[in-house]
Image (tube, grey):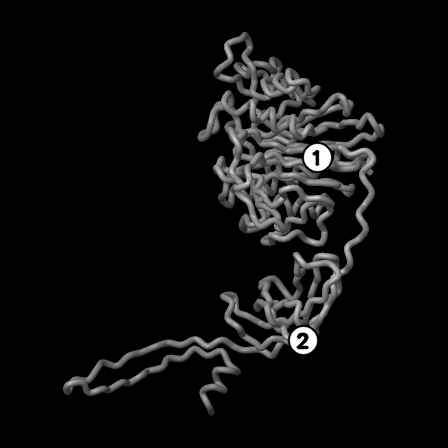
């Protein structure tokens, strides 16, 4: 049997003992041994089909050749497959190819590969599919609400960067520049600012609210309580009483546009005395429409270990359960916060998975291990959505390509509703460098929604 045929049709592990006897000046070189692994090869995958096309994506499927194989999809706008690009998939015989041009014919073929990208089959015959035309632009939203999430970096116990006193003017300017109707803060701490000397001190979130109001912005707190104690203003010798406090997880709303109905908070599981994590919520009413909605804000465990993953899982499940209990009238819901997990977090983006499984929508379509938006994305206009929500105080704002989603640990999820625009708010120059003081190590994110 020819060796080439063996290599083509079998996975073999064999030792090749190469006996080399060369006489060089009368001296024999020693025997050399080598081990060669040869991968099994497959026939080309068959049945390449496209069950779904959108203006910017084509979903492909094909017949599987096995349970533990990967595939490579080659795409081109040319029938001879020239000038193409490939996409690998390691999770089955289906793939959404994203970032395509509307009303354009693309050609695809697929082959089997090993996990390291080694080819294990020839390519299948090419198949062509056409993306849909772009739909007409939707009419302007009649009664938009601007929702935002902003981790403002705690004042006195967060290391690195400038102090709160050096940053707070930039934080206030960022908020005024966007004028959210409702904003969920994280790390707007309830502890007293060290720079304050007045009786009972001043908490970071109180300082922020006062500065916004002094600038003419009518922002109210959904809960002004500092601590869940009988004496909420001072946690010393605390006698527990649920006051609806939620540490630095605070909700503010623009009272010109929003009426307050009620609010509350939930201490999330896997919290410790030194690291309490909360869900804060508010029932609010849009004055223009009279529609009531639920706005929820959270800040999940930040630990990168497996215990942190478990904590975020339990915390997000608790959030879903609590909101289900609260939402007896099937009101619109917006959930914001710092989830401390992105779509490349391992083993998976747990908060994202739990919330989307519960029916909440990520407007950006920022699915696991993808950078291009999915066809399920609902946002109509993207403004700097390619910038990361966490900037790490880098002088140049971290971002991806213009048509991609940035890396997000901060989120805005919605129940089913129209999302007219998304902006990741960065004050940058033409080179992508932050201008002036960087307000926080997170960028504000905001979304304009229409309540159903």
The residue that appears at 60% across and 25% down in the rendered structure is 173
Q: Nearer the viewer, residue 370 or 395?
A: 395
> Splitting the image into 4 quarters, where does residue 180 fall?
top right
**Residue located 81% across and 33% down the image:** 143
Helix, strand or loop for disc 1: helix
Residue furthest toward the left?
Answer: 25
* Other residues around mark 1 within 10 Å, as few (<14) / some (14–19) / many (≥20): some
331 left or right of 381 in image: right
Q: Is residue 106 above or below residue 236?
A: below
Marks 2 and 1, Cα distance to the nearest angstrom? 47 Å
The answer to whether residue 241 of the structure is visible from this angle is: no
Q: Is residue 315 above or below residue 97?
A: above
Picture disc at residue 322: 1
Residue 186, quarter of picture: top right
Residue at the farthest top position: 199
* Cβ–Cβ under 8 Å for marks 2 and 1: no
Q: Earlier in the sequence, mark 2 or mark 1?
A: 2
Kindly state the secondary structure of the residue where label 2 is placed. loop
Residue 439 in view: yes
Front of the two marks 2 and 1: 2
Tell me the residue at 55%/23% (across/down). 168
| Label 2 sits on residue | 46
């Amino acid at each position: 049997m020819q060796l080439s045929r063996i290599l083509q049709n079998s996975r073999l592990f064999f030792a090749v003992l190469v006996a080399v006897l060369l006489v060089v000046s009368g001296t024999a070189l020693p025997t050399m041994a080598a081990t060669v692994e040869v991968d099994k090869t497959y026939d080309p995958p068959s049945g390449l089909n496209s069950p779904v096309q959108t203006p910017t994506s084509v979903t492909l499927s094909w017949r599987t050749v096995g349970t533990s194989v990967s595939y490579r999809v080659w795409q081109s706008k040319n029938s001879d497959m020239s000038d193409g690009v490939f996409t690998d998939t390691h999770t089955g015989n289906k793939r959404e190819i994203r970032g395509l041009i509307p009303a354009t014919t693309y050609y695809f073929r697929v082959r089997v590969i090993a996990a390291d990208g080694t080819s294990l089959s020839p390519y299948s015959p090419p198949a062509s599919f056409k993306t849909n035309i772009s739909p007409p632009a939707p009419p302007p939203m009649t009664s938009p609400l601007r929702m935002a999430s902003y981790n403002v970096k705690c004042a006195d116990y967060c290391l690195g960067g400038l102090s709160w006193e050096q940053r707070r003017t930039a934080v206030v300017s960022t908020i005024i520049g966007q004028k959210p109707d409702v904003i969920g803060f994280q790390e707007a701490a309830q502890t007293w600012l060290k720079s304050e000397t007045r009786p009972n001190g001043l908490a970071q979130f109180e300082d922020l609210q006062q500065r916004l109001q002094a600038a003419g912005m009518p922002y109210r707190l959904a809960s002004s309580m500092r601590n869940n104690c009988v004496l909420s203003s001072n946690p010393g010798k605390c006698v527990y009483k649920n006051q609806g406090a939620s540490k630095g997880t605070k909700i503010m709303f623009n009272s010109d546009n929003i009426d307050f109905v009620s609010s509350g908070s939930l201490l999330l599981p896997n919290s410790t005395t030194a690291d309490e994590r909360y869900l804060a919520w508010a029932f609010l009413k849009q004055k223009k429409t009279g529609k009531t909605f639920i706005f929820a804000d959270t800040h999940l465990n930040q630990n990168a270990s497996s215990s942190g993953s478990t904590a975020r899982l339990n915390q997000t499940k608790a959030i879903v359960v609590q909101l289900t209990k609260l939402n007896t009238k099937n009101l619109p819901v917006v959930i914001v916060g710092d989830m401390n997990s992105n779509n490349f977090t391992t083993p998976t983006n747990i908060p994202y998975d739990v919330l989307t499984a519960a029916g909440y929508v990520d407007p950006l379509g920022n699915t696991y291990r993808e950078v291009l938006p999915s066809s399920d994305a609902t946002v109509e206009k993207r403004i700097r959505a390619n910038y990361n929500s966490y900037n790490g105080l880098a002088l140049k704002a971290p971002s991806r390509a213009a048509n991609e989603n940035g890396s997000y640990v901060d989120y805005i999820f919605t129940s089913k509703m129209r999302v007219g625009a998304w902006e990741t708010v960065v004050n940058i120059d033409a080179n992508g460098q932050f201008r002036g003081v960087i307000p926080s190590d997170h960028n504000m994110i905001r979304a304009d929604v229409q309540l159903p």
